[in-house]
Amino acid sequence: MKQSAQRITNGKTENPEEKPSRRLSSLKFFVRYPIFLLALGPPIFRAPNALRGFDTSQAHFDIWSVFQVAWIAVPTVRAIIRLIFARSLSIPKQIQAVLRLAFFLGLLYLISVIYSPGRVISAEFAVLYSFTMICVVEFVVDVYRNPPNWVQCLFQLRLVAILGLIIVLLTVPFAPDLVVNFRPGVGIRFLGGTVGTVYVICPVIAIISAYSFLHSLESRLRSTAFLLIGMIGTLITQWRGAEIALLVVCVVLGVGWAKTSRRAAYISISAFMAFVLLAGAVVGAVRPERIWKTFNRGQSAEGIATLSGRTGTWTEVIRYSIDHPQGMGYIAGIRWSRIGSGSAASMHARLNNIGGTDSSYLQNLADAGWLCLALYLIMLAKIIVLGLRFAKKAALKTLAIDRVAGHAIRCALLLLLFCLVTGIDTSVFVTPLSQGFYFQNIIIAVVLGASTSMLISSRSQNNRLG
């Protein structure tokens, strides 16, 4: 008798075609996809005052600068070689549209070199931006031919984040000033300095672990442990933007999971009620004004209203951009302008003596003007729409063969949501050589790559039905 192509596992019919790609060892994975290693930053053990006295809008370098560029250049050279010798560069049109916008942004950054007050710095960062985009393109081209195990991509991204956190923790006993910031009246802020951006690393660990826990992608004990590590690490940073963004993501994740089944809905409602009761008990035991003071780090009403002075910086950037719609020049412009040097940017001065707008969106506006900001927002919108198209439950049922890719898209969209919300009060997600920049672009690469896999499956299924 001819055996069926399907087999029964745990009472469910399993189709061999639905099996996800084989997982690789961590070493083989990073050799195959070195773009994930960019998320390490890399760690730079540079003292907070190492650049004090330098005009950071002008060319300067030290051994750490050389190390940073080399870290990014190695996978870029590999990507270029692989793209040159690739038999085909097949990329779906929907993905091409996003990549075109990304490279148009790079072109605007390059054009801004002409009017930048620090042309060398602007040109260098424009090249570094292009390096990252080349790695993203090579990743998408590679997964088009041979899709990876997408759940492993999430876990390996979390592994890189964990390694980054371990490096920061190991730095504390030997050089606490590199990673810990102490402010009178506020206390210890475990920000990570240039070694690792803790307020990005820890939420990434927490989000991937929470998603894995709810969807049973790994051992519940492991995901719970990493979830607690990510949550505690985020709270220790005392970065309100990251805390609020993580809360928003958790709410979205919980609501989405509650819709998967009636049991999940009951559990979610029960957990919400328990949270409300616990919050009420805490408020009753601790005075509300004390909780408010703790959350706001003892800031004055003016400091809270201006988001630690950020709104003043943003107002100055917008006023400048109204008169100069082309912007100031990529990266170097905002540093040279000294806009906001007396408010939010002073934090950068204390940590690294490098100014910024403290906003991913206003940073693009300052870098290359209104057109740049518009292209950045359109690109993000296209990525979100593309991801949501394949994250829908109906799409996952139709394309059962790519359920694993569906998990990757959904989790990556949650990570991207965190980046977008946190990006309101930090510019690390759009500044090359910042760890957040590589995390966001790797997340985008996962969304584009997983969407590519879903598109391939869709076409294959349509061809079989035809």
Image: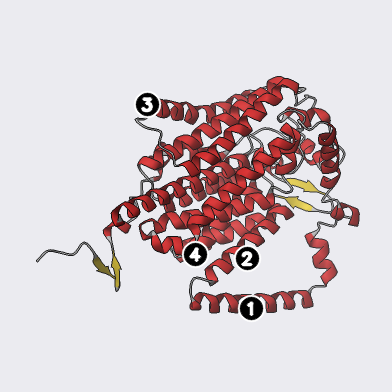
Q: Which residue is mark 2?
A: 251
- Whether 264 is drawn above or below 209: the answer is below
Choose between 171 and 373: the one closer to the eye.
373
Mark closer to the observer (4, 2): 2
Choose between 3 and 153: the one closer to the eye.
3
Q: Are marks 4 and 2 in contact (CB under 8 Å)?
A: no
Q: Please tell me how crowded label 1 is: few (under 14), some (14-19), or many (20+) other residues with Cα within 10 Å.
A: few
Mark closer to the observer (2, 1): 2
Q: Which mark is residue 7?
A: none
Q: Are marks 2 and 1 in contact (CB under 8 Å)?
A: no
Q: Which mark is residue 85?
A: 3
For marks 1 and 4 on the same chain, the one whose residue lies earlier in the sequence: 4
Residue 441, position in %: x, y? 56, 41
For marks 3 and 4 on the same chain, the one whose residue lies earlier in the sequence: 3
Q: Disc 2 to disc 3, how far (Cα)?
A: 45 Å
The type of residue carrying mark 4 is Phe
Residue 435, position in %: x, y? 61, 40
For marks 1 and 3 on the same chain, the one whose residue lies earlier in the sequence: 3
Residue 89 lies left or right of residue 3; in this view the side is right
Seen at 45% across and 27% down, the residue is 80
Q: Which mark is residue 213?
A: 4
Q: Disc 1 to disc 3, how far (Cα)?
A: 58 Å
The type of residue carrying mark 2 is Val
